[in-house]
Image (cartoon, grey):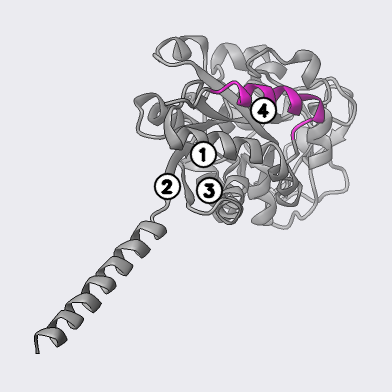
Amino acid sequence: MVRKSMDILKIFVLVIVAVFSQVGLSKDLLINGAGASFPYPLYSKWFSEYAGVKKGVKINYQSIGSGGGIRQFMRGTTDFGATDAPMKDKQLAKSKKTIFHIPTTLGAVAISYNIPGVKQSLKLTPEVIIGLFSGEITQWDDKKITQLNPGVKMPAHQNVIVAHRSDGSGTTSVFTEYLAAISSDWLKKYGKGKAIKWPTGLGGKGNEGVTGLIRNNPGAIGYVEMTYAISNKLQMAQIKNRSGEYVLPGTGSVSLAASEAKAQAPHDYRLSIVDSKAKGAYPISAFTYLLVHKQMPGQKGKEIVEFLKWAVGPGQKLASPLHYSPLPKSLIESIKKTIASIETKE
């Protein structure tokens, strides 16, 4: 009887050991990040794919906008941040740790619209874009629009409804930088940055929110990252660039906007490629970045570095299918050196 009880006890102990062993094995290292919604479709794919590449490492990312991503990273509540708008010198100076901007991909801010009966891609000049987003052009059959698009039948007296971001946003920063570049009057009146006081329109949170506003409001026009426009079947405008060409957003036209990036890029990669002079370039294009500390000791720091190496390496192949442009080859080697300089010692 005693022997039988001992055998039962041994079996019980072995079961407990096995259960706790499995718990230990299944416990992933969790890396938390938050920020830009601009690259979220690509980042979501990356983190999913990387879970298969590196077992035991899980990356959790919250698409809360560039402003929120910077704030959380600065507060230390996330392991990395994400932004389309590079941090300003004043922001960087507030951090006790050196912060690196790691470019991950390039994307485009599309001007999308929902005009009843209009299925064509409209042509828009910088002047008309300013007129629409400033509230000066209030109806879609305005002559300034119809003269640019003679083959398009615009609905009579259809009001223009501007959709914009309500949160601190890198997409807004890129778009308003473009507006400021094409109009000194816009810069003087409304400025540029992650959040501005819009002269007109409705606000939505994230690229997702603005996409919803455009889809649900006849007569709406707004700005969203190109992937959101394509996946939601929104119309996208052809924008007249500095070379006088009407260009649609696309991976090719975005890559052309970054064609001179190596010559322009500062050592920390904080550069703008809006309103590019290059032929064929889409004028509202931008890099997007992951924010990491130069010193990230411990296993988590090592795993973040390994992910960054993968992202600027094999991960670049996943960009084009999701309508993002891979990083210019001329910059990748330099970015790899920056990643290699991150310190991860205990």
Can you identify the residue that label 4 sits on?
131
Q: Is residue 216 left or right of residue 297?
A: right
Q: CA distance from mark 2 to mark 4?
A: 50 Å
Q: CA distance from mark 3 to mark 1?
A: 30 Å
The residue sitting at the left extreme is: 2
The answer to if 309 sits in the magenta stretch is: no
Q: Nearer the viewer, mark 2 or mark 4?
A: 2
In the rendered image, which quarter is residue 182 located in?
top right
Q: Tell me the chief SS of the magenta region.
A: helix
Q: CA distance from mark 3 to mark 4?
A: 25 Å
Residue 117 against residue 43 in the figure, above or below: below
Q: Nearer the viewer, mark 3 or mark 1?
A: 1
Disc assigned to residue 6: none
Please, what is the three-letter code of the amino acid marked with disc 4? Gly
Q: Are marks 2 and 1 in contact (CB under 8 Å)?
A: yes
Q: Earlier in the sequence, mark 2 or mark 4?
A: 2
Q: Which residues are magenta?
A: 327-342
Percent position (x, y) of residue 334? 72, 22
The kind of secondary structure element at disc 2 is strand
Q: Is residue 141 left or right of residue 240?
A: left
Disc assigned to residue 208: 3
Disc assigned to residue 303: 1
**Disc 1 crowd, CA 10 A, few/some/many (<14, 14-19, 20+):** some
Percent position (x, y) of residue 187? 60, 14
